[in-house]
Amino acid sequence: MHAAPVAVGGIGGSGTRLVAQLLRAAGIHMGDDLNAAADTLLFTLLFKRIEILHCDDAQFDLLVQILVSALGGSEPANAAVGPLVRSLSREDRPQHPATWLQQRSESLIAIMQRPRSHSRWGWKEPNTHVVIERLWQRLPDLRYIHVVRHGVDMAFSTNQNQLKLWGPHVLGEGYAVTPSRSLAYWCHVHRHMQELLVANKHRMYWLDYEGLCRDPRAEIVKLCRFLSCDSGSMMPMLAEVRQPSEPRHESNALDEFDAIDLDYVRSLGYMLREVA
């Protein structure tokens, strides 16, 4: 249990960066190639692409082996890895140009050629939830932290990257990026995550971001209990935790949202405030 890898995911903008900082403070290696949001970019290269939804088992197995080798430092890459990794960066993706992907692939290859062993490792990439079930099939000890933030506030966020990438597959083609569609996507994801939580309580943790901000000490203790790690290593990070901001949605009318989606948000304990 103490050496189980750890992954962090959620809808983009939900607070996953703070959770990644807490895990790094606990000594968990989260990768070497990170962006300003602390995303583990080798995961982005390997898995954040629409083709992953149709990836066969053999290739998915190899992608997971690359992920484990690069983050866990188990062994140097074999000769076949370079061409495969480079093949993932030949063309632009909707949110990442080929030049950016090429930088990620070369960084990944360099890391795998000089592996460093880590007693505990993991990654933070919001899109992890898209493939978490297939990852569990190959990494049954993987501990997954799903970070959750108020769905209606998320609907008014400027970060709608997941909706743009996965929304057409989940909700259907031909719709604009709107707050109501964003909430529909959020509800779809979290209903599914709730189902997974029921069946995987020993390896999935539902982390409420607002709850973490309100009472970080108590929430850190619970998180560390799930991870079987020492909470004392995270406590110096308390100064980084900010009180919850004012709800984004409170100055907006909510009549554009589906009533069923709003009821689902309320069912998770989130209050709704709107303009009179």
Image (tube, rainbow, N blue to C red):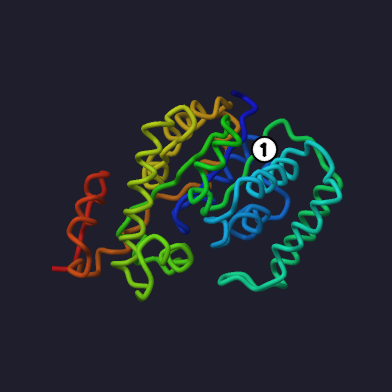
Q: Quadrant of the N terminus?
A: top right
- Horizontal and vertical percent position of residue 145: 49, 40
- Residue at 60% x, 50% y: name it: 56
Q: Residue at x 57, y 35 (%)?
A: 234
> Quick check: 96 left or right of 19?
right
> How dense is the environment of label 1, judged by Cα within 10 Å: few (below 14), some, or many (20 and up)?
many
Give the number of marks. Answer: 1
Q: Is residue 249 above or below residue 244?
A: below
Where does label 1 land, which residue? 121
Instruction: Please state which of residues 131 and 266 is positioned toward the viewer in this rendering.
Output: 131
State left or right for residue 93 relative to residue 196.
Answer: right
Q: What residue sits 70% from the left and 66% below the top?
A: 101
Q: Secondary structure at mark 1?
A: loop
Three-letter code, disc 1? Trp
In the image, residue 85 sits, relative to residue 210, either above or below, namely: below
Relative image position of residue 228 (x, y in whole percent): 55, 25
Residue found 57% across the figure and 31% down from its top? 140
Instruction: Look at the picture and state if 204 lies above or below 91.
Output: above
Q: Position of residue 153 (x, y in %)?
A: 33, 60
Observer-nearest residue: 230 or 185? 185
Q: Is residue 55 left or right of residue 253?
A: right
| Residue 100, position as x, y percentages in the image | 70, 69
Q: Quadrant of residue 252?
A: bottom left
Which residue ends up furthest to the left in the rendered image? 276
